[in-house]
Image (cartoon, rainbow, N blue to C red):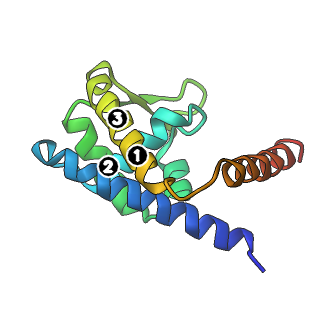
Amino acid sequence: MFTIEDFLRVSNQMRDYYAKKIKDSFQEFNFSPNEISILIVLKNNSTITTSTELKVVLGVSKTLISRSVDSLEKKGLICTCIDEKDSRIHHLQLTGECKPILKIIDEEIGKINKTLFNDVSVEEMKSLKQTMSKFLNFVKNV
């Protein structure tokens, strides 16, 4: 049986694959795969805004998240904003300087998708999308 843990493990492996492939296109910027993963997650998930949430989603240590966030801040690609209601919470935001990088990431993801999904039929993709939608609807209604 394919468990949710199996699904999450596969999802993390896919994310790692994308990050490693994209890293090759960013050698001049000296990004780590984890930094690229953080940029992708922040770009695609507006509800994920803290290091703690990134730690959970990416399945990596708090130390690695902290080191990667610090590096991205020094590069001017993300900034932190203190929560208005709870000063212990720092929200992460992409900066305007990040837009050209995100454009390149999107282009690279498109190239990876063409290769990765080359042997996946339209029917299989539709089925996967339907299954994912079921999961999403379930968790939204809980």
Q: Which residue lies at the image location 44% right of the left edge and 46% below the top edge?
A: 114
Q: Which residue is mark 3?
A: 107
Q: Position of residue 110 (x, y in %)?
A: 41, 39
Q: Amino acid at mark 2?
A: Glu
Is 38 placed above or below 124 here? above
Q: Which of the two discs, 1 and 3, labels the residue nearer the N terminus?
A: 1
Which residue is label 2 attached to?
A: 35
Residue in front for this viewpoint, 129 or 66 = 129
- Give the residue at the far bottom of this rendering: 1
Question: Which of the labelled discs sits on residue 38, or is there none?
Answer: 1
From mark 1 to mark 3, how far is it between C-alphas? 17 Å
Residue 92 lies, in percent from the top left, at 43, 34
Label 1 Cα crowd, 10 Å radius (few <14 / some 14-19 / many 20+): many
Q: Amino acid at mark 1?
A: Ile
Q: Is residue 67 left or right of residue 27?
A: right
- Identify the disc placed on residue 17: none
Local SS, label 1: helix
**CB atoms of marks 1 and 2 within 8 Å:** yes
For badge 3, the amino acid type reads Glu
The residue that appears at 26% across and 36% down in the rendered structure is 73
